[in-house]
Image (cartoon, grey):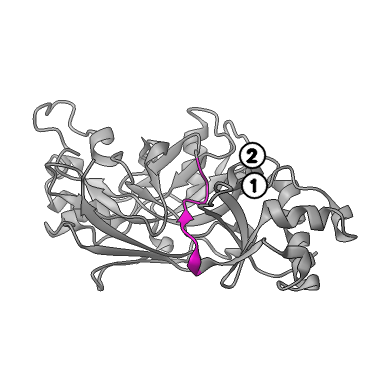
Amino acid sequence: MNGTVFSLATFAGSPGGDFAAIVLGDSAIALNRVYPAYRDSARGKAGPLTATGSISAMLEGWDHNFPALQEIVAFIEDEGLDSDRFKGAVAKVSGLRVLAPVQQPGKIFNAAQNFQEHVDEMIRAGTSDGAGSEFKGEKSTSRPYLFLKAPSVLAGADDDIAIPRGMEKIDWEAEIACAIWKKAKRVTAENALDHVAGFMTTNDVSCRDIGMREDRPALRTDWLGGKSHDNFAPMGPRFVPIAFVGDHMNLFLRLTVNGEVKQDGNTSQFIYTPEEQIEFASNILTIEPGDLFVCGTCGGVGMGTGTFLKVGDVMETEVEGLGKMTNRFVEDKS
């Protein structure tokens, strides 16, 4: 098997529509264009892809598709990117518009307050009911806290994000996301990674104005209003197969606003690991191919200091080895 490290991405296409690509350096190789040449080659006998049109479609059957992708990368290297066989298949990443890698996921699970420093800063900011609500990571007496984010609010790694009309407390949350490839029900944390295909950089953009409902204090948290405005889930720019991630429990998370560092943490600080989150969720409902887990943010969010995003601000979100996103905040003209 070929050992070359590669990633996958989804790009906006014209006029042929959006397309999935293998990314090698600054080159994007459209899978739907390179695959026929690979299939007809000697290497193509190693096994077919079940899909070429999208990363989402490739997730189901990932155990077969990942080895096939490795062979396709080896085939590309054998032939060379400038081969006539790849005419029209290769483009510079810098000249393309990148989309969220996994389009139209079934469910997006998000972990709330999964770093102790983030728990503490949110208590100081008054989003919890005093000392009785304090949480010190006592996993023996607690469980992960997950909420759902609307799949339609995914955005690309370089997309603009509109500040919703009338809202003034738009916040950032740098996070990692993992994508599920195999259906799971009541999976254990020890076996959870067997269901994960890869990881991505993401940001759980949040609207603090209405995240806590003052008009309905007994209900308190409004997850829809606080989390699911359009483009509030930028993700990407790449999908990195789990085989190339190394230790997902030792990756830096870093976020800047207009060049100023706001968050600088590490996934080693998770209270609940992605595996434990998958176990918890799969004991409630069936986890399916294409579902995403967004695993929690470190300290340094805007709510902690009363500092929020405004029109013209540029937010950069980076996870070690998974890539950087650059999103500008703009006026809502919808």
**Whole-percent x and y of residue 262?**
24, 67
Camera-nearest label, 1 or 2: 2
The amino acid beneath tag 1 is Asp
Q: SS at mark 2?
A: loop
Secondary structure mostly seen in magenta is loop
Which residues lie in the magenta part?
A: 94-103
Labelled pair 1, 2 in contact (Cβ < 8 Å): yes
Q: In the rendered structure, find residue 194 and report the number of the disc placed on it.
A: 1
The residue drawn where x is 83% and y is 50% is 47
Vertical arrangement, residue 236 with respect to residue 265, above or below: above
Q: Which quadrant, please, contains the C terminus?
A: top left
Vertical arrangement, residue 62 with respect to residue 107, above or below: below
Residue indicated by mark 2: 182
| Viewer-proximal residue among 153 and 213 | 153
Q: CA distance from mark 1 to mark 2?
A: 8 Å
Q: Is residue 249 left or right of residue 60?
A: left
**Whole-percent x and y of residue 205?**
29, 50
Q: Which quadrant, please, contains the N terminus?
A: bottom right
Location of residue 84 by image quarter? bottom right
**Whole-percent x and y of residue 231?**
33, 46
Check if residue 80 falls in the magenta segment.
Answer: no
**Residue 2 in sight:** no
